[in-house]
Amino acid sequence: MNWIIQEAAPVPILETNIYAFPTEQAKDLTSEAKSTAPFHLLMKWIDPEVILVHGNEAQKYLKERGIGRFRIEVKHFSRGWSKDEAVAIGRRIKLTCLREA
């Protein structure tokens, strides 16, 4: 994420998950921990210009609910990213936000 954040500057970046509880894998979440209410409240409050969505589950979730004016969908961050790939995503975020401004 640091490479993406550095390249996207000065665009502010918020890193979050659909679920508020951290686990190694989503399957490790208890049913109580799978509440998405905090995520929905956050999206409503900040109404982000761009959402970088990583992983199939998150992509499907946001797509089904129509969340995000502009979504950049990429492979899960745990699947091995090169610095060049991360920098390219950061640049894409910056260009998209500057174009929308």
Image: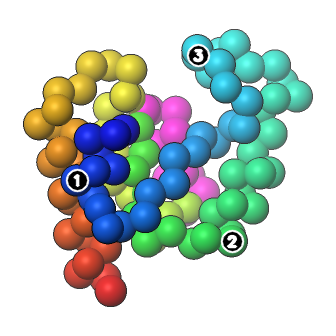
Task: Name which residue type carries label 1.
Answer: Glu
Q: Position of residue 42 (x, y in %)?
A: 69, 60
Q: Is residue 20 above or below residue 51?
A: above
Residue type, numbered disc 2: Trp
The residue beneath circle 1 is 7
The dot on residue 45 is 2
> In the image, which residues are magenta?
55-66
Task: Quote the CA–CA distance across marks 2 and 3.
Answer: 27 Å
Q: Identify which amino acid the numbered label 3 is placed on.
A: Gln
In the rendered image, the vertical position of residue 58 relative to residue 40, given as above or below: above
Q: How many angstroms separate mark 1 from mark 3 (CA)?
A: 28 Å
Question: Looking at the picture, does residue 20 appear above or below residue 76?
Answer: below
Q: Residues within 10 Å of mark 2 (few under 14, many from 20)?
A: few
Q: Is residue 32 magenta?
A: no
On the image, the x and y values in percent for residue 68 come to 49, 64
Q: Image quadrant of residue 25?
A: top right
Q: Secondary structure at mark 2?
A: helix
The residue labelled by disc 3 is: 25
Displayed quadrant of residue 78: top left
**Sequence-earlier tag: 2 or 3:** 3
| Closer to the eye: label 1 or 3 | 1
Answer whether residue 61 is visible to the viewer in this image: no
- Considering the numbered disc 1 on the image, is that residue within a helix, a strand or a loop? helix
Give coordinates of residue 1: x percent, y percent.
36, 38
* Magenta stretch contains residue 65: yes
Q: Is residue 12 above or below residue 7?
A: below
Which circle's residue, 1 or 3, is located before the other in the chain? 1
Quadrant occupied by the C terminus: bottom left
